[in-house]
Amino acid sequence: MAEISENKKNFQRVILFVAILIVLLFIRFSVFGKEKDFDKIMKYTATELNKTCPQQIDNDTRLDSASIHENKTFRYNYTCLNFNKDSMDVEMFAMSVKPAMINNAKSNPDLQLFRDNNVILEYYFRDELGKFMTRVEIVPAEYLN
């Protein structure tokens, strides 16, 4: 009789373990599966945008490429034509362009999916000689308020 009771307890433990495993797998694939799907969307977006690069934005700015990075970060890589890092105040430059970038992140209909998924937008700027100038980051708290 004790043997049947012990087998019943073991069977219940196995059932409980399998149930927990199924729940954990379901959560993993439903939650993290969406993350992976969105990563694919971001990769596709960067790939399609890169097909149009380099793209002249205005007289002083060229979009060279886009890429994705950790923590749902989408990076735009720009070259500032007619600018030399050594002869300008790059901090002032970053401060002057950030408000327009936040406004674009808030209002551009093409970025709605990024807004819906709390994507971090990064803008990397290089000067006309290819030297890194500055990086401007727009986080969801800045464009969702």
Image (cartoon, rainbow, N blue to C red):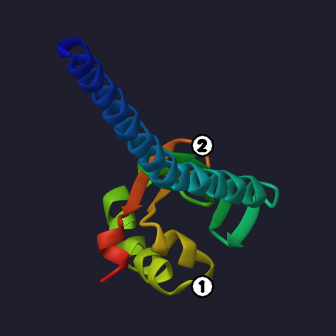
Residue for badge 2: 130
Describe the element under mark 1 as helix, strand or loop. helix
Which quadrant of the view contains residue 78?
Answer: bottom right
Tell me which label, 2 or 1, sits earlier in the chain: 1
Which label is found at residue 46? none
Work out whether residue 39 or residue 144 is closer to the camera in this orientation and state it: 39
Work out whether residue 104 or residue 114 is closer to the camera in this orientation and state it: 114
Q: Position of residue 126 (x, y in %)?
A: 54, 49
Q: Quadrant of the C terminus?
A: bottom left
Q: Nearer the viewer, mark 2 or mark 1?
A: 1
Q: Is residue 99 visible?
A: yes
- Residue in the image at 40% along x and 33% along y: 18
Q: Position of residue 37 (x, y in %)?
A: 61, 54
Q: Position of residue 82 (x, y in %)?
A: 61, 60
- Residue in the image at 37% along x and 57% along y: 90
Q: Are marks 2 and 1 in contact (CB under 8 Å)?
A: no
The amino acid beneath tag 2 is Gly
Residue at the extreme top of the image, as rendered: 3
Q: What is the total number of numbered labels drawn onto the structure image?
A: 2
Is 45 situated left or right of 87 in this image?
A: right
Q: Position of residue 88 (x, y in %)?
A: 40, 57
Residue for badge 1: 109
Q: Residues within 10 Å of mark 2 (few under 14, many from 20)?
A: some
When the figure is inspected, residue 130 is found, relative to residue 110, above or below; the finding is above
When the figure is inspected, residue 102 is found, relative to residue 37, above or below; the finding is below
Q: Is residue 77 visible?
A: no
Is 31 situated left or right of 57 in this image?
A: left
Q: Residues within 10 Å of mark 1 (few under 14, many from 20)?
A: few
Work out whether residue 142 or residue 116 is closer to the camera in this orientation and state it: 116
- Residue in the image at 32% along x and 59% along y: 91
The amino acid beneath tag 1 is Pro
